[in-house]
Image (cartoon, helix red, strand yellow):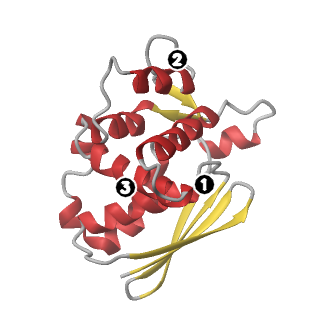
Amino acid sequence: MPPAAAASSPHPAPRRMRYAPLEGLLRSLDISERSAEMKEIVRLSGGTDYVPSEIPVENFAEVLHFLARTRFSSWASSEGLFRVGACLFEGYRKTLLGQIQLAALHLLGPDRLMRKAPDFVGRSSNFGVRTVEQLGPSHYRMDFRGVPLPGDYYNGILHAALRATGVNEPQTHWEQTGPEDMSFDVRW
C-alpha cells in the first residue's frame, strides 16, 4: 500500500523498513553473521534467528542507535548516526540491489541526484512523504514528513551520495520541524 493510502486508511499498515538498507550497513561495517553484534542486531530488529525481510521502523531506529553507540562510541550521538548513514550508503552500493539502482550515480551529477533523492530514500520504506525543491544553483531543500528515523542518519546518507556524484565538499544541514518531520538544506 502506498504511504499516502496507508496514512488515510482507518487501520494503516505497520510502518516498516525493508532489509536492503540494513544489508548495506552489515556489509559496510563488516559485521560477521555469527558474531555477538549480529545476534544483537537480529534481536533489535525483531527477528529470532535472522533479520526479518521487513523491519518495524521503531526496531530499525534501535539498530541505528545501537550501531552509532558501538561502532562510533568516541563520537557524539549525532555524529555517530551521521557516520552510520554514510556507512549505509557505501555498503548499499555493494549490494545487488544497490549496484543496480546506483550504477550510474557518478553520471547523474548532484542536481539529478537531488531531484531523485526522495524516491531513492523512500523505496526502502512504506511510510512518510519526501519532497525536494531547488532553491537556486547548487542549492536544494528536501523535506521529510512522517519519517520517524534520525535526521543525522539521513544527513549521512545524503552527504555520502553527493560525494559519490563528485561533490568534494557537500554542505548539508538539517532541522527537526515536527515530531516526525525534518528539513534538509543542501548546497555545494
Q: Quadrant of the C terminus?
A: bottom left
Alpha-carbon span between mark 1 and mark 3: 22 Å
- Residue drawn 58% across the image and 41% down it: 61
Which comes sooner in the sequence, label 2 or label 3? 2
- Farthest residue to the front: give it: 74
Indicate the secondary structure of the residue bearing disc 1: strand
Which comes sooner in the sequence, label 1 or label 3? 3
- Vertical order, 96 against 65 (above or below): above
Badge 3 density bin: few <14, some 14–19, many ≥20, Cα 10 Å: many
Indicate the secondary structure of the residue bearing disc 2: loop
Indicate the secondary structure of the residue bearing disc 3: helix
Q: Quadrant of the N terminus?
A: top right
Is 115 in front, or is 61?
A: 61
Q: Position of residue 62 (x, y in %)?
A: 58, 37
Q: Total number of numbered labels?
A: 3
Q: Quadrant of residue 95?
A: top left
Residue carrying label 1: 129
Give the amino acid type for the residue marked by disc 2 in the picture: Gly
Alpha-carbon span between mark 2 and mark 3: 25 Å
Residue carrying label 2: 47
Evaluate whether residue 12 shows in this view.
yes
- Residue drawn 52% across the image and 38% down it: 66
Q: Residue 48 vs residue 22: left or right? A: right
Residue carrying label 3: 86
- Residue drawn 54% across the image and 21% down it: 43
- Farthest residue to the right: give it: 10
Q: Position of residue 84 (x, y in %)?
A: 42, 50
Evaluate whether residue 120 shows in this view.
no
Q: Quadrant of residue 175?
A: bottom right
Badge 1 density bin: few <14, some 14–19, many ≥20, Cα 10 Å: some
Q: Position of residue 72 (x, y in %)?
A: 43, 50
In front: label 1 or label 3 = 3
